[in-house]
Image: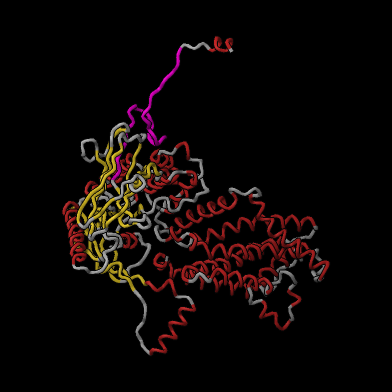
Amino acid sequence: MIVQTNPLLKLRDLTWAWTLRTLRGRYQQSALGWLWAIVQPVATVAIFAVVFTRIVPVDTGGVPYILFSYAAVVPWTLLAASLPDMAMSLVQNMNLVGKIYFPREALPIAALLARIADFGISFVLLFLLVMFYGIPISPLGLLFLPIIFLIQITLLLGLGIGAAALNVFYRDVDPLLKLIIQIWFYASPILYPVTLVPEKWQWLYFLNPMAGIIAAYRDVLIYNRLPGDYLLPAAAVSLFIFLLGYWFFKRVEFQFADII
Amino acid sequence: MPPVIRFINVSKRYNLGLTRTSLPSVISQWAKQTLRRSASTNRKYHWALRDVSFDLEKGQSLALVGPNGAGKSTILKLLAKITNPTSGKVEVNGQLSALIELGAGFHPDLTGRENIYLNGTILGLSYKDIQKRFDEIVAFSEIEEFIDTPVKRYSSGMTVRLGFAVASCIEPDILLVDEVLAVGDASFRQKCIERIKTLLHNGTSLIFVSHDMGLVRSVCERAIYIDHGQVQNTGTSGEIIDIYNQVLDRQRIEKMNRADAGAGDVEGGVEVTKIEALDASGRPVRETYGDQPLEIRVKYIAYKDIGKANAIVLIYRSDGLMCANMRSHLDGYPLHIAKGEGEYSVRLEPLQLFGGTYYAITWIMNADDSDGLAYGASDWFEVRNRVPGREAHIAVYEPNRTWRQNAGVNVAESARQA
């Protein structure tokens, strides 16, 4: 038998197998199974809906609050769920990393893919909601969806792979990351619309790539308009973070096995 | 043709301090250094390998022999590209597969089938390749009926069998084998060795690490004796095993002399030198029957007078099940260990074990049974069933027994009487 020599094909097969392993492991012994993918964002939205329609009303620009909120919570949940998973992916499998050689990227990438599966399910529900409320989406807007998604994946890959590698050296990464995600949540337009941010600070605000990504999802899906210029800094910052994270990962991956 | 493996002056240094570079410790380190104004770095290093060189030609088999911590596993890790050398060069020409930690990638919740694909891809096989070899892997591992059972319900023996089957279905140019055959029953071990020999015959080169010198002798042509991260000797496996045994003997004598010179406390003060299973006439056995007597004999060497001590002898089945737990002091037989060599034994008559593969371990405990002083494990021995065709491992106990039936009682008759 010939062992796979093309490293990219090897990475692909392994990543795929590891993703399936993660998904099966996650839902094997759970009664709700993949429905958990929806439970999390729906529950979040339900709480927000109570607080921000009854107690502190938020100006959604005429869109039902539930839709306004869910359109942001879905991409945010992908980030909040996948980053800790990715960060832990190497550390949790140290026995494997220390004993067998394989492309190490496979573990964090698979952790992300397994969460993207959840994202896909909750995104279907998002689409159904949009149709239920009878909100039109332009075909051009639909073309933008994969681009927005790609920008988000680039961002998550860079952060996740970098965090996974750093976590091998410093276990502080995991609690720190959770803290950052908590703060990041309020720095992103999830509870509120971007229009709430003063005009003169918008340039700074959109240096947060998640601001641009969420604003773009909202523009396309619930406001039936194309994303604005703000998507450019999001793309640039995401790409930069991706390159930085990947570079760091590649630089230190040979030390992983020495640090168990 | 160039050698498939070349180690050229390879050294590997591990930084022992690296795991403790937390911020508080970095600050205190920094504070100490500024206070003392010394430039000396307080870092601790461990040289796992120093200046190791060797070659391996195509089709050759090489054993790495030496005590724990000698650097054998580091060599395997360098070969498998898991870690990089600190200095020197490691050349590997060809496709390499490592039988290290079998089943390391298994997920307990997934079935055997799912794990075959997962483990195969970790080892570098493509999905299609695994599909092609799937039946062969299952047949080799002998777990057909459990292939759709989650691996967490497998015995350790079954897990290892599946792990070996996946890892060895690759026909690599170079195969690394690290102590993986220590688990699993004797017949499967034999099968694995046959498989390794077949691979060797087909041109695979082998690097083999084992503490089982019999195995080293039967599988490898050449061997390297490694200690303290350095190559001490190279030669045929027979030569190296002799040298290694001499070194072990010499170390014992030295230890004895040190104890004589009163150079502090020799660790434990006693060492098990041999533990073996003997038949009725006192000959070592590898194969016996449950209705035969068996004696477990332990030889030890004490470097000082220990006085009262207790012996424990445990018999394990190959899958890790403890089948007997015998403690001399509970049986009213405390040992008395004086300086020098000695032996003790426990006789089981008859053995009363069901067919299977077993091994014995022993502990010499201190007088109040609170601390182990010395440990030893025997080779495997096989217990055969008297009735051919009875499957081994399905029971543990083979009692001495008498069957009886009261024939001739008519049920209808006895019912009417009642």
Above/below status of A118 relative to B115 = below
From the top left corner, tell me how far across and down residue B361 is, in percent. 32, 48
Along the horizontal axis of the image, is B279 left or right of A243? left
**Residue B211 at what x, y percent from top left?**
28, 53
Name the foreground residue: B35 vs A196.
B35
Residue B83 appears at what percent x and percent y? Answer: 37, 65
Q: Is residue A202 above or below residue B265?
A: below
The residue drawn where x is 19% and y is 59% is B247
> Measuring 40% from the left and 47% from the top, which residue is drawn there?
B163
Q: Main secondary structure of the magenta part?
A: loop
Q: How many marks?
A: 0
Camera sees residue B215: no
Please check the rendered image and state whether residue A18 is part of the magenta-colored stretch, yes or no: no
In the image, what residue occupies the spot 51% across and 44% down? B150
Q: Classify B34 as above or below A175.
A: below
Q: In which quarter of the image is residue A217?
A: bottom right
User: Would residue B347 be seen by someone viewing this image from the given angle?
Assistant: yes
Give the left or right position of residue B206, taking residue A141 as reference. Answer: left
- Of all residues, the one furthest to the front in this rendering is B332
Quadrant location of the N terminus of chain B in the rendered image: bottom left
The colour scheme used to paint the residues is secondary structure
Which residues are drawn in magenta? Answer: B379-407
When asked about the image quadrant of residue A195, the answer is: bottom right
**Who's the residue at 27% across and 66% down the image?**
B265
Q: Nearer the viewer, residue B179 or B311?
A: B311
B41 over B76 or under it: above or below:
below
In the picture, the quarter occupied by the C terminus of chain B is top right
- Residue B351 is left or right of residue A136, and the answer is left
Q: Where is residue A93 in the image (x, y as percent from the top left)?
A: 47, 59
